[in-house]
Amino acid sequence: MIRMEYPSPDFRTRTHDSGRPEIFDEIRRRWVRLSPEEWVRQNLIRWMIIVGQYPGTMMAVEKEIKLGSLRKKFDILVYDRNHRPWLMVECKAMDIPLTKDVLMQVLSYNMAVPVVHMVITNGNECHIVSREQGHVTWLDKWPVYI
């Protein structure tokens, strides 16, 4: 497990006409509903860019994928320098425990979009699985961007 320490938040937020809070997503370049899961997602994206030095231009957020006849959305996908899917993140709200079911969710997404690294997080902690050359290992730190 990796404990997360985030940079100080300096997000752009607003209240929508309907009264619901929104946050500006720099990757999607639009305002999105500020749910507890979105708060985790935005803090993690910010950490990945500032601390992890992952280029924001190589990230996709909440894109649809097909799993057989099902349509699902991954939270964050990071592409490597050759534009190949490299790391996928499944975010949960801070009060959601990181269970086997959460891990199975990101593993199923990996069937549609194969990546080397899979991350599950609830904002407080992260678990990272690396799959290289047929070997699966749990990492104790974030992989360096390649």
Image: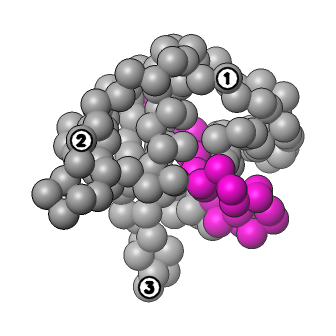
Give coordinates of residue 36: x percent, y percent.
Answer: 51, 53
What's the residue at 77%, 25% (across, down)? 141
Upstream in sequence: badge 2 or badge 3? 2
Name the residue carrying label 3: 69
* Secondary structure category for the residue under label 3: loop
Upstream in sequence: badge 2 or badge 1? 1
Task: Depth check: give the residue in front, 67 or 11.
Answer: 11
Give coordinates of residue 42: x percent, y percent.
Answer: 45, 38
Calculate the distance from the C-alpha at mark 2 to the C-alpha at mark 3: 37 Å
**Image mark for residue 5:** 1
Q: How many neighbours does mark 3 have within 10 angstroms: few (below 14), some (14-19), or many (20 or more)?
A: few
- Marks 2 and 3: which is nearer the front? 2
Calculate the distance from the C-alpha at mark 2 to the C-alpha at mark 1: 25 Å
The residue type indicated by label 2 comes to: Arg
Q: How many neighbours does mark 1 have within 10 angstroms: few (below 14), some (14-19), or many (20 or more)?
A: few
Give coordinates of residue 105: x percent, y percent.
Answer: 65, 66
- Marks 3 and 1: which is nearer the front? 1
What's the residue at 54%, 34% (across, down)? 44
Q: Is residue 141 visible?
A: yes
Calculate the distance from the C-alpha at mark 3 to the C-alpha at mark 1: 38 Å
The residue type indicated by label 1 comes to: Glu
What's the residue at 44%, 85% (across, down)? 69
Q: Does residue 66 appear to the left or right of 90 in the view shown?
A: left
* Secondary structure category for the residue under label 1: loop
Q: Is residue 145 visible?
A: no
Q: Which residues are magenta?
A: 79-106
- Marks 2 and 1: which is nearer the front? 2
Q: Does residue 132 appear to the left or right of 71 in the view shown?
A: right
What's the residue at 83%, 45% (across, down)? 136
